[in-house]
C-alpha cells in the first residue's frame, strides 16, 4: 500500500501539479510533505498527513503579521509559523503591507 501511495504522489507531481499552477500555502509543498511522511512512517501516516494538509490548504486562510513575524491561520484554525509558510506568500504580503499603511 505504501508503494501505491508513493507512486500516486509521484505521478501527481510529474503530470498534474505543474499544470494546476497553484502556489501551496506551505513552504514544503503538500505533495512533498505527504511523500516524505509516507516514505518515513508508512501508508497510514501518509494518508493522515494528506488529510490534514488537504483540510488546511483551502481558501479562507488569514496571513497576519505579528511582531515582525508572519503567521498563517488556516480555515480550520490551525496556526502555521512563518518558517512553514511558503516564501511567495510572505513576499506578496510584504509588498501589500506598505500600500495599506501608506
Image (cartoon, rainbow, N blue to C red):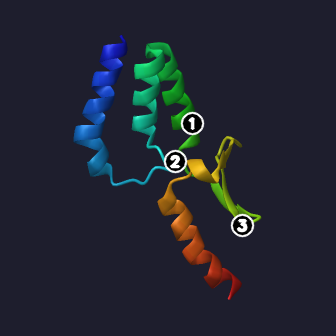
**Which numbered tag is attached to residue 27?**
none
Percent x, y of residue 95: 55, 76
Bin the neighbour count of mark 3 within 10 Å (Cα to Cα): few under 14, some 14-19, many 20 and up.
few
Question: In the figure, 61 relative to 38: above or below?
Answer: below
Bin the neighbour count of mark 1 within 10 Å (Cα to Cα): few under 14, some 14-19, many 20 and up.
few
Q: Does the residue at mark 3 contact the one at mark 2 (Cβ under 8 Å)?
A: no
Question: In this rendering, would 29 be left or right of 8?
Answer: right
Question: In the figure, 78 relative to 65: above or below?
Answer: above
Q: Nearer the viewer, mark 3 or mark 2?
A: 3
Identity of the residue drawn at 25% across and 32% down: 11
Bin the neighbour count of mark 2 within 10 Å (Cα to Cα): few under 14, some 14-19, many 20 and up.
many
The answer to which image quadrant residue 100 occupies is bottom right
| Among numbered discs 3 and 2, the one appearing first in the sequence | 2
Query: Which residue position is annotated with label 2?
Result: 26
Percent x, y of residue 23: 43, 54
Q: Does the residue at mark 2 contact the one at mark 1 (Cβ under 8 Å)?
A: no
Question: In this rendering, would 34 be left or right of 100?
Answer: left
Query: Which residue position is annotated with label 1?
Result: 55
Residue 44 visible in the shown view = yes
Query: Which residue position is annotated with label 3?
Result: 68
Identity of the residue drawn at 28% across and 49% down: 18
Q: Using the numbered discs, state the Cα–Cα distance from disc 2 to disc 1 in whole angstroms.
A: 13 Å
Residue 60 visible in the shown view = no
Question: In this rendering, would 13 be left or right of 67?
Answer: left
Percent x, y of residue 32: 40, 36
Give the SS element for disc 1. helix
Question: In this rendering, would 33 be left or right of 93?
Answer: left
Q: Nearer the viewer, mark 2 or mark 1?
A: 2
Question: Farthest residue in the bottom direction?
Answer: 102
Amino acid at each position: 500500500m505504501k508503494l501505491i501511495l508513493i507512486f500516486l504522489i509521484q505521478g501527481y507531481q510529474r503530470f498534474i501539479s505543474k499544470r494546476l499552477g497553484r502556489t501551496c500555502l506551505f513552504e514544503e509543498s503538500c505533495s512533498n510533505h505527504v511523500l516524505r511522511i509516507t516514505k518515513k512512517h508508512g501508508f497510514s501516516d501518509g494518508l493522515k498527513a494528506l488529510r490534514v494538509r488537504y483540510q488546511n490548504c483551502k481558501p479562507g486562510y488569514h496571513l497576519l503579521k505579528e511582531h515582525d513575524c508572519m503567521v498563517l491561520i488556516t480555515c480550520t484554525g490551525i496556526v502555521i509559523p512563518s518558517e512553514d509558510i511558503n516564501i511567495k506568500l510572505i513576499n506578496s504580503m510584504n509588498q501589500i503591507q506598505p500600500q495599506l499603511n501608506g
